[in-house]
Amino acid sequence: MRARKGRVRNECVALGGRAPLTDIATSLNVDLDHVERTAQKLVDEKVGFTISGGELFAEEYVTNLQSELRVLLQEHGFQTLSSLCKHWNLSQELLRSLLLDHLSSDFDGLIEGDTIYTTDYLNCRKNLLRAIMASITKPLPITAIQARVGLPIGRFWWAFDSLMESEENAFRQQEYIQTGVLKKLGLSEGSGSKNGQVEQILKEGDKSLKFQALPSILLSMPLFQQCLSTVK
């Protein structure tokens, strides 16, 4: 058995650290069930091997994939699962069982649908959206803005909502917000109107909030009253 384990291990290493069990059986001219039992022994002994999808993988091979994935994400900020599967000739099941289910604890990102993103990349896209919104001078279709930002629709609305939330927080901290910011975000600031989107957003969690809408700025009522008192 020890000699057989050595041959199976050596065959896997000789094939680059990844070998279908059927190929090992053919190469060693032994029955597949013998190879399967021997490979499972290697895994059980925890000597740096794993079995997935009918293939035997050396730990070094998996470690190299993890390192390459880390480099790809650092360089590009995202990778689609389909492109990774094609690049490494892995099924989605293998990709998940070998890599995605064992991402290191320091991985800062997320997997959504067919794509894995780094947090840095998503924040950069959000900052790009902020810059685009600050530079446009006329209404643009959402699809046009989304294309410039380069995010799928779900992630685009995440970035948009994050910007809106930051503007909401700015209002709560400063008690005012410029209406130009709201218009660029495609929001109506009409006070007292059922369709006043900003009023609906700002009153979430505080239905008693009151504010005054001026041509270029939106103020909380206490700040507006304070301004009036100062002028008097």
Image (cartoon, grey):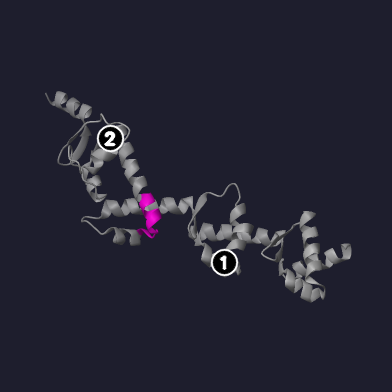
Residue 47 seen in the figure: no
Q: Which mark is residue 85?
A: 1
**Which part of the image, by quadrant, shows the N terminus?**
bottom right
Q: Residue 187 carries which label?
A: none
Q: Where is residue 100 in the image (x, y as percent from the top left)?
A: 58, 56
Q: Position of residue 178 (x, y in %)?
A: 23, 41
Considering depth in this image, is 87 or 82 the residue closer to the camera? 82
Residue at 32 percent across and 52 percent down: it is 131
Residue 79 seen in the figure: yes
What is the quadrant of residue 166 in the picture? Answer: top left
Residue 103 sits above or below residue 210 on the image: below
Left or right: 157 in relation to 96: left
Residue at mark 2 to residue at mark 1: CA–CA distance: 47 Å
Prevalent SS, magenta region: helix
Q: Where is residue 163 in the image (x, y as percent from the top left)?
A: 34, 46
Left or right: 58 in relation to 149: right
Question: Looking at numbered disc 1 in the image, what kind of residue is underneath it?
Answer: Cys
